[in-house]
Image: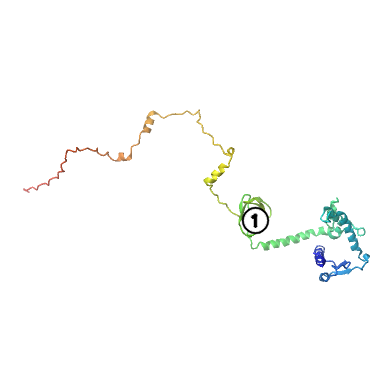
């Protein structure tokens, strides 16, 4: 942004960092005298003071600042006029730590109450904050502790406690960004437990390590699948011979004598056991062969007994 719009944006950033000034002095350039700039200064309650035309001494402080910045830019810019160089930033730090000849205070002392650390060695006490700032530290700590305690009680009113995880636990990870937010479609393994309910999780598939809060992790028990014969053969085919464990051969010890059972015991062992049917039933009669040239008489029926006529 350039012109009055860029000037207004730069002024607002300065106001947010250092506060709103009471007076703004300028040489009356077109950016400072535009209607938008005048309205902005009026809304923020800032008085705009203009210097006389063609009379640089009326705006002496601004002219001195411009001359100082020109000297810094002349010796510390890049080959193409770039200001993003280490030498330029070091020159700015040194300028802000240099005391003024009249006030004996550097710009850093006027704004922060202490020196800011640069590349020139100095006493460690120079970097200590102002005594007034140090005296307010305990009061600020008490105020912030009370405020955070109340906020914690308010936020935990409708929450439940989540049990801590351990290294090696299988978890599901909830997406917070991407095309599928709030989906539990990724899994991983906890590889490190940190403070404040934070865990380093190794995502399955990509093996990427991600830092997640306990709120976005859900523990689960993975199913144990039995490998198929094809998977076992595939693993065996890619396994080197030296990695296959060798089964030790079982050899007969020579110090243990071998004995053979007696002959009668061997005979008894070789005999077939009688069938339980032969033990319970008698043997069937032998089959008799009848000659073909003989005929058998029909069986004689017994004659009935005659009644005693005398009786």
**Residue at x 78%, y 58% (from the top left corner):** 138
Specify whether 54 is left or right of 3. right
Where is residue 297 drawn, in percent x and y? 15, 42
Residue 37 drawn above or below residue 106:
below
Residue receiving disc 1: 214
The tally of labels here is 1
The answer to whether residue 105 shows anywhere in this view is no
Where is residue 204 drawn, in percent x and y? 62, 51
The answer to whether residue 186 shows anywhere in this view is yes
**Residue at x 33%, y 40% (from the top left corner):** 276
Where is residue 94 drawn, in percent x and y? 86, 54
Query: Most extreme residue toward the front, as rendered?
Result: 80
Q: Which quarter of the figure has residue 179?
A: bottom right
Q: Which quarter of the figure has residue 47?
A: bottom right
Specify whether 40 is left or right of 219. right
Query: In front: 9, or 264?
Result: 9
What scheme was used to colour the molecule? rainbow
> Could you say whether the residue bearing mark 1 is in a helix, strand or loop?
helix
Specify whether 207 is left or right of 257. right
Q: Which quarter of the figure has residue 196?
A: bottom right
Residue 70 drawn above or below residue 295:
below
Residue 296 drawn above or below residue 3:
above
């Amino acid at each position: 942004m350039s012109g009055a719009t860029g000037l207004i944006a730069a002024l607002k950033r300065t106001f947010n960092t250092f506060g709103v000034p009471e007076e703004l002095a300028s040489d009356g350039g077109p950016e400072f005298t535009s209607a938008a700039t005048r309205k902005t200064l009026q809304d923020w309650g800032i008085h705009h003071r203009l210097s006389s035309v063609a009379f640089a001494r009326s705006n002496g402080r601004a002219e001195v600042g411009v001359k100082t910045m020109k000297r810094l830019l002349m010796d510390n810019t890049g080959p193409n006029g770039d200001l993003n160089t280490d030498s330029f930033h070091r020159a700015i730090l040194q300028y802000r730590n240099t005391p003024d000849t009249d006030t004996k205070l550097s710009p850093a002392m006027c704004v922060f109450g202490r020196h800011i650390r640069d590349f020139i060695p100095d006493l460690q006490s120079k970097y200590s904050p102002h005594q007034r700032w140090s005296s307010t530290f305990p009061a600020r700590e008490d105020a912030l502790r009370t405020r955070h305690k109340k906020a914690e009680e308010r936020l935990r009113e409708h929450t439940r406690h989540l049990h801590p995880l351990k290294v090696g636990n299988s978890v599901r990870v909830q997406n917070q960004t991407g095309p599928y937010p709030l989906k539990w479609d990724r899994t991983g393994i906890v590889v490190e437990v940190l403070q404040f309910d934070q865990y380093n999780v190794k995502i399955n598939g990509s093996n990427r390590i991600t830092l997640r809060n306990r709120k976005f992790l859900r523990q689960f028990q993975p199913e144990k699948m039995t490998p198929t014969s094809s998977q076992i053969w595939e693993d065996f085919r890619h396994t080197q011979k030296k990695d296959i464990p060798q089964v030790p051969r079982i050899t007969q010890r020579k110090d243990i004598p071998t004995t053979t059972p007696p002959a009668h015991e061997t005979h008894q062992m070789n005999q077939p056991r009688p069938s339980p049917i032969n033990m319970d039933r008698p043997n069937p009669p032998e089959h008799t062969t009848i000659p073909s040239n003989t005929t058998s008489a029909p069986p004689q029926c017994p004659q009935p007994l005659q009644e005693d006529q005398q009786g």
